[in-house]
Amino acid sequence: MTTSDYRSNPENFCYRHPDRQSFVLCQRCLRTVCAECQTQLPVGVICPECQGEQAKNAKVTRISQGASVYRARDIRPVATYVIIAITSLVSVLQLFPGIGPFLTQSFALFPPLLYPQLFGYFEPWRLLTVLLVHGGIWHLLLNMFALWLMGRTLEPLIGRLRFVVLYLLSGLGGSVMVVLFGFDTSVVGASGAIFGLFGATLVIGRHLNANIKGIAVILAINLVITFLPTLLGGSLQISWQGHVGGLLAGFLVGFILVKTKRLNQRGMQAALLSLTAVALIGLLVAAPALLG
């Protein structure tokens, strides 16, 4: 082939930039692509159109290890954003003089209100609505930042529904621990659920052989902050019960997820998660007897 023949052949030039000569072909469609149009993959390069098609078809993401698999249909942490939005809205409403005190009094966790034999009230919603109200703007911002930090990694890995279940079960675990070890205290905040996300991330990350040192250090620092005011006898009160209860629940849910992650184990996974919820509720029912 002569030089003029080579230059006149459009297949020797980028299909998107006809003035740019290239020797690289897209691995999928075999069209010539220049350096600007190339997307590097482990097995070669692909063109922009093939990259877009691949991204469209990759809405079902598989993170596999051997014969096991986690599935997530969308990598966007939508559930995380929704939880942040709802929690932030409730916390903003707390700032209004009329509705703020009402929300705090109605949503905060005060264990005696779970047992009608004590005050004649039965308000079980407080076990979860406690996650929506906070003790101030900094309390809210710290929790929501931690939720965003953990959710954007964890939710795409385990899926939206599992993430929501993990969040709620961790929050419930924190509330149960408050009932058992802080019965006369009033608690607000999503910290129990946040600690549950830390716990599940450690378990899942360890199972996937990921580097979890950073998460472990952050968790350790938060645990020190949790117990430090109590040890020093300061005026700042932090519910260690909610934090530890949420963390333990997160550990348990994370363990369930990694042990039942095969596609044919969905039924067992749902059953074990339901059993976890039943066990936590059972502890609440038995709390009066346990507390004497």
Image (tube, rainbow, N blue to C red):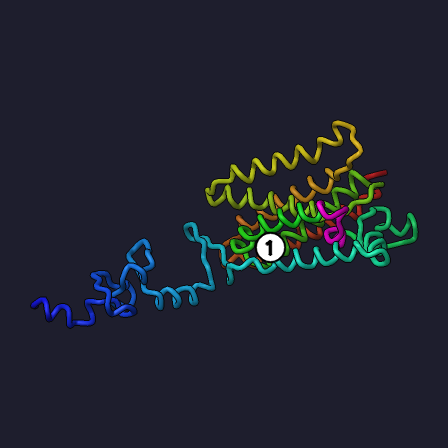
Q: Label 1 belongs to which residue? A: 163
Kind of residue at badge 1: Phe
User: Magenta stretch: residue 69 in it?
Assistant: no
The magenta-colored residue range is 128-139
At a point 74% along the width and 54% down the height, the residue shown is 91
| Element assignment for label 1 | helix
Residue 96 appears in the figure: yes
Residue furthest to the front: 19
Judge by depth and name the residue closer to the eye, 287 or 209: 209
At a point 56% along the width and 37% down the height, the residue shown is 216
Q: Which quadrant, please, contains the N terminus? A: bottom left
At a point 92% along the width and 50% down the height, the residue shown is 119
Where residue 130 appears, as percent x and y from the top left, is 76, 51
Residue 124 appears in the figure: no
Where residue 98 appears, as percent x and y from the top left, is 86, 58
Picture layout, residue 137 above or below residue 85:
above
Q: Is residue 34 left or right of residue 165?
A: left
Q: Is residue 109 left or right of residue 53?
A: right
